[in-house]
Each structure stands twice: as structure tokens, then as C-alpha cells.
Amino acid sequence: MIENVLLQIHEPGETPMPHAGDEALAVGIDLGTTNSVVAVSKEGTPEVLRDENGHGLVPSVVAYAPDGSAIVGNLAKQLLLMRPETVISSVKRLMGRGLADVKSISGTLPFEVVEGEGMVRVKIAGKELTPVEISADILRALKERAEDQLKYKVEQAVITVPAYFDDAARTATKDAARLAGLDVLRLVNEPTAAALAYGLDQQAEGVYAVYDLGGGTFDLSLLRMEKGVFQVKATGGDAALGGDDFDHAILEYFLEERREKFGEEKLTTDDVKIALVTARMAKECMTENDEGDFVLEFNEKMSKHTLKRENFDELAAPLVERTIEICRNVLEDADTFPDEVKGVVLVGGSTRVPLVRKRVGELFEQDPLADIDPDEVVAVGASLQAEALTVGSDNLLLDVTPLSLGIETMGGIVEKVIPRNTPIPVAKAQEFTTYQDGQSAMAIHALQGEREMVDQNRSLARFILKGIPPMTAGAARIRVTFSVDADGLLTVGAEEVTTGVSQEVAVKPSYGLSDEEMAEMLRDSMVHARDDMEIRLLTEARVEARRVMEAVYSALHIDGKLLNEDERAHINVILNKLDETIAGEDRHAITAMMEELDRETQVFAQRRMDKGIEEALTGINVEKLENAIES
Amino acid sequence: MDAQSSNMTLRNDHSGLHPCWSCKGPVAEADLFCETCHAVQPPGHIDHFTRLGLHQVYDVDVDGLERTYFELQRHLHPDRFAKKTPKEKSLSQQQAVSLNEAFETLKDPLLRADYLLQVLGEDGISHDHTVNDPALLMEAMETREALMEADSVDAVNGLTTKARRDVRDCVKSIAAAFAEQKLNEARKLALRLKYLTKLLEETRQHKARLVLK
Ligand SMILES: Nc1ncnc2c1ncn2[C@@H]1O[C@H](COP(=O)(O)OP(=O)(O)OP(=O)(O)O)[C@@H](O)[C@H]1O
Ligand SMILES: [Mg+2]
């Protein structure tokens, strides 16, 4: 509000000086398995950023040119048919995944993955790249699209992730954004973003289900929407279930027919990539038609395949039923019956599949709402949240943890510390003890998932709390704290309570990139990485210095009387000097001046405390006093 | 927001004044924002009731509690601090964490009873691992049996309605016991509530299995 007024007080023809950083806009990005979308919201009006042909969707496909440069989007998609060895799609399926995870994804994969520790690497165009780097290329393209259209520098974004993404996949997404030169204001869950866009647009009130079936992931969230509050009650999903799996099912069906016709065939990764394009076309065709003929050609052999409604529904049924089962579980978790759900919002391209609509309608006993664009609604919600975070908003998003978080205990059993569907941010502590006399270290192993045993869950991180002073077994009290922030990211801390020996780790390793790897990539990706870092530190110092100045001004306004004229003049001089350094470019000077201000206001601070205590003792309410001053 | 935020401060304890981390002016333990410079404060060491603006009583208007919770989150949630300094971001997260914990505890009749007992210096109910109330055990067994035999939605609905009514009555009795300072009685009733809540959950699950086929 106030900003608007200020902006109007300038003479015509005179441009107001923007504060540092004000000229930048924050965007919302839906980084999808199949398609990505970037949107921006200004004064509450969201807008999808489109290409010259009006397309908002950017295919999440990357082609690598011989010089190593990345081509993203429709052009890359076309190159897939011509030069499959240089093109990669659906890389989101690999985010935060290890080799074993990838091998367990069903079907023939259109990736050539490389053996190794931690997150998988993909062999593409003769190089080995991490999913994080490839995603960063997609994000860079979206950033460029936004900058070209908005004529602004875009450095901040809200990025959406599947609600069911685990910690490793979330961290990987944030890392990708960093590589692309984007500061992630917040990771928002895709169904929550969709609900925000839908709810604000339709003035929806009540409990709604958001069913999001995209290219690679499935989420179901139950939310209560009410007067600007979007409260997630429960969420569930499968981070490896989406339209891609329908494509794989169709492809397997076609390949089986080919095998019958031609006998055993060996398929290369490139063949699979091309065949999957046909399979997807067949699937999408079956949305409008009840029958279609499709042709596959490789190994110099051509085959024709017919797909009928019954065949397709039979192939799709197991996948659709898996989503329905998840819906049931979420309803149960939220203690909600289908008839208590006021509306079902469909999100994601795969919700166009007729069988999906039919089964969802049957489960919730109502026709799903189709009056939104299932492809763009997530990005629209993200852009609204980006505006809310930077400009402000009265809306409130309250989300939950999708998966339980726990710790390994004796016998390989997982003890839950934070159960799934707990509102975030959250912090919970659990105490453990040593089991040997004189034990000086303790291994902490954090896991994510619902199962009982360690190896059935996802390992997030391991670390060792060292330096426990020798005590008899059972005497040490080790308090392990799990904190999940508003992005859904976990930090684990461990402390020996009696002595205060402590350690804290932002959960990273297991399937992530190490700090060194990340640093190296940042170096490679940004020629001016160093300058960028300097600018960032300078901006941070300025923000901090402004806060300090504001604080001192507020104090002077209320308690200025506690100073004599000389003292007040002295503080004013330092305030002016600090103001000057803020206008300059030297962050060390800013910090030094802040320290000086701190020193020189200590006496003032002491007098203010004394006055406060005196008033408290004589029962004068500070609020009353303040009102008296103001009136 | 600032004008409102000073209204949001819950200051009923003037003894524990300490300097604001930002402007060094006096702030009370329960203050969310500094009166002087409006900087967000670390969550004070106050009980859940005080945090949500309530007296330490069992009888809580859950709708009102939720309104207070939303209102406080509107001011404290990390989404409101995206443009602030790292220190303020971190404090807002701590505040939101404390608020979530307080709300999750107080909105639930069972957790609230358990927590209030502890606030009043009694053992919580998780202290008891065994229930030695023969009447309660008997009742539990009979109801379980009835539930096992219920094979239609109507039959389960009947049991659900009864379980709901039992829960409601039990919550009322707990409130009465707390009001009359009969803490042992409150504790016994809270154990009963624990069982009734579990039973209600089981009937819902049972119904879910029948309905969601
Ligand atoms: N008409 C259609 N009929 C059937 N499926 C369709 C149709 N149109 C698009 N799809 C499928 O929708 C999927 C892409 O949906 P969408 O763009 O919502 O996914 P995404 O956001 O990229 O993925 P995710 O959210 O899982 O990361 C693809 O599998 C595509 O084949
Ligand atoms: Mg999507």
C-alpha cells in the first residue's frame, strides 16, 4: 500500500529511483517432467509467459549441440527424432535418485545412466551430466523467456515440486535453480499451487481435492480453502507415476506384437526414445478416438499396430487404480469421506485420459472440475505465490510433510520423529542414549518413508555425533532434532544434553550432490560467479544495514528523550555515515559502520531497558505510553 | 501490519523484560514483535495456552482457536519474511514452528488434556502404560466385537454415532473435572478418551473399507 503512494509522488517525466533489487520481478515456474511453464503475477493478475505462437508450455526437453550449448523446448523435441543421442527428456524422473532407484522404474528407459555413487549421471551427446545440470538448462531457458518478455532481470522464483517429492529431489531442484542463477524464494507443492490459483479465481470455500497426474508424477492433496487460507489437510502420491508410464505400457504392448512378428529384437536407447514418441502420440490420440493405427520402424523393419479402447483401458487400468488407491489412503488420513469433498480439481495433462476422469468421478461421487487449464494452473499458482512473497499478500498457504521422517534405531528399525501430514514448518526432538560404557560417538541415520525397517525407507543422510564425554551406558542423553522448513527441507541436529556437544547438518548426501560438486558446477556455469557472489553479499549487507537504521530510528522516535542533545547528535552523525556507506559499494565499510553504530548506541539501549523495567514495576503499560505519545 | 502486530502481542507478564535483539529496547517474554522497532522476536518460553491467547483451561472453543492460529500465522509464517534478513527469516520459522506445535496440541481434545495435566504439574497420560480400569476394559472389548460384526455401512454408522457421542460426553466430563480441579478424575477420563478416540478411528477405518470398495 505505502509503496504505491510513494511511487506516485514524483514529478512527471522524472523517474523515481528504484531501491536496489526493486527492478527485478519474481516469477513462478512449474518445472514439469514433460512440460515447463513460467508465469508472472502483477497486482494480483497472473499471466503465463508465451512464445510468439502463443504457446505457454515449454517441453522439458534438452538437446546438446556439439559445442556443449543447450537447446531447450520445441526445437529440442523436434531434434529428438533426428538426433536422439543428443536429446534428453523426462529428466525430472531422475532428480535426487540413485542408480538403484532408476533401475526400479519400470519399462525400458530412454536414458543411458552411468554407474556411480550418489545421484545418477546420464550419458548424453558424449558427456556425462547430472539431472541437476540438465534441469538447470531448462530453468535457464525459462529465465531467459521471462527476461525477454518482461524486459526485466529475473533472479528470483517460486518453483513448484510434486508434493510427494522427497528431500533429495527437493534439494536437487533447489540446486538446479542455483546453477541457473535463480534464487528460490520458496519451493511450493504443485497441488497446493494449483489450489491457490483455482481457489482465488473461483472464490472456492470448503474441502477440495487436487488430483494432479502429469508426465512423471502423481499427487493428491486434500485442502481446506477458506477466506484466503489454503490449508493442506493431507497429501499423498507417487513420484514415479505419470503419463510416461502410460507411454511405457503402450510401448511394451507394441513391442510384444513386434516380437511375435519378428522374433527377439535388441533395442538401443535411441530406438526407445523414438518409439516412446509414437507411444505417447497413440495415447493422446486415444483421448479423442476409440481406435487408432500406429507405425513403428527401427532395425529396418516396419510394424503396424492397432490400439482399441479396450486394449488401451486395459493397459491404463493398473496405473489408474494405483492413483485411486492413493486417493483412498489420503481420504482416510484426512479423516474425510468422498461426499465431504466439495470439488475435485484436475491438474496435469494425463487427467485428459478418459479412464482417469471416469474413475476419479466414481471415487469422489462427482464430476471433476474441468473449468481450469490443467497445464498452466500450477505455474499460475506459483506466480501468485511469488508475488505474495515479494510484494505481500493476505493469503496464507499452510502445507504439510508428505512423508514421515525418522531415525534408525537398534535392530535396523525406524523410529518416526515427524509423521507424514504434519503441518510445516515443524521441529521435533527425540532423546536417545548410548548403549556402551564410555561410548564417545553415535551414528545418526535419518530416513524418509512409511515403512518399519531401515532398508525399506529412503536414506536421507548419515552423520556421526562425536565428542560425547565418557559415561556409563545409558547415561548420555542425546537429543536429535528434526526441523522441516517451509520448503519441506529437513535439517537434523544432534546434541548431548548434559554437556552440550552438538552438531547440525542440512540433509544432503545420500543421493544428492556434494558441496564440492556443487561448487565446481557453479564455477563452470557462471563465468562471473565471483562477481555475483559479491553483489549478493553487498545486497545482503545493505538490507541488514537498513534494518539496523530503522531499528535505531524507531528507538529514537519513542525514547529519544533519554538522550541529551550531544548524545543524540552523535548518533545522528553515525546514522548519516551509515546511510552514506549503504549508497556506496563497499560492504566491509557497511559492516564496520554497523558495528560502530552498535557500540555507540549501547548506553542508549541500557537506558531504554532501565526505563522499561521501571515502567513494568510501576505498572505503566508501554502500549498506553506509546498511545499517549502518538496522540 | 505493524499496527496490527502490536495488538497481537500477548503481554501479561512484565517481570521478564529483555532487550530486543534488533533495537535493544525492552520486550516481554510473550511479545511476538518488538513494540519499538517491530522486529520479529524469538518465540518466548510460554506455554501453548498463552501462545494462543488462552487461559490455562480445558474448555476451548476450537473454531475460535483456529481463527487465532490463522491470524497469528498470517503475521509469523516464513512466507511473510521472504524479503527480510536471514535472522528475521530464521526467527519467523521458529515462531511458526512453536505456533504449529501449540495449535496441534490444543486443538486435539486428548493431547490438550494430556498437556494441561502436565502444565498443572501432574503426570501426563502417556505415563500409564496399562489401563487398570476394569469397566473401561470390558466396554472396550464389547465395542470391538460389535465393530467386527458390523458388515454394513448402516451398522457401522450406528457405532460411529455412538462413539462420537461418547467422545463428546467424555470431553465434557473432562472439562468439568478440570473446572473443579479434580485432576485425578480428569486424568482417568483422559485415559478413557484415549480409548474412545482410538475406537472412533477404528470405526472410521472400518467404514472406509466398506465405503471405498
Ligand atoms: N490429450 C491428452 N491425452 C492423454 N494424455 C495427454 C494429453 N495431453 C497431454 N497428455 C499427457 O500429459 C503428460 C504431460 O502432462 P503435464 O504437462 O501436466 O506434465 P508435467 O507437468 O510435465 O509433469 P509432472 O507434473 O509429472 O512433472 C504427458 O504424459 C502427456 O502425454
Ligand atoms: Mg505438472
Image: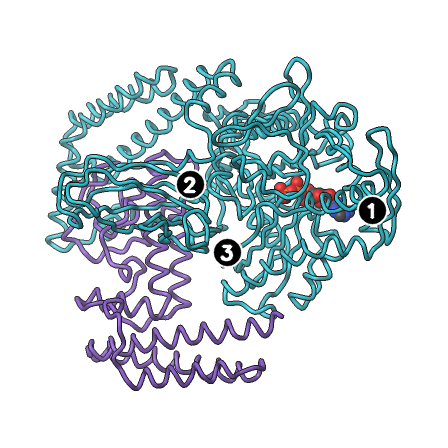
Q: Are marks 1 and 2 in contact (CB under 8 Å)?
A: no
Q: Does the rendering let one see residue A625?
A: yes
| The color chain B is rendered in | purple
A282 relative position to A403: left or right: right
Q: How is the image coloured?
A: by chain
Q: Closer to the camera: disc 1 or disc 2?
A: 2
| Label 2 and label 3 in one chain | yes
Query: CA separation, marks 1 and 2?
Result: 41 Å
Ligand 1: image quarter: top right
In the image, what residue occupies the spot 53% across and 18% down? A525
| Colour assignment, chain A | cyan
Q: Residues within 10 Å of mark 2 (few under 14, many from 20)?
A: many
Mark 3 neighbour class, 10 Å CA radius: few under 14, some 14 to 19, many 20 or more: many
Q: Amino acid at mark 3?
A: Val
For the C terminus of chain B, the image quarter is: bottom right
Q: Nearer the viewer, mark 1 or mark 3?
A: 1
In front of the other: A557 or A390: A390
Type of amino acid under label 1: Cys
The answer to which of marks 1 and 3 sits earlier in the sequence is 3
Look at mark 2 in the image and give the residue it sits on.
Answer: A460
Q: Amino acid at mark 2?
A: Leu
Please determine whether, in this image, residue B24 is positioned above or below residue B212.
above
Residue ID for mark 3: A232
Whether residue A278 sits left or right of residue A170 in the image: it is right
Q: Which residue is mark 1?
A: A285
Q: Secondary structure at mark 3?
A: strand
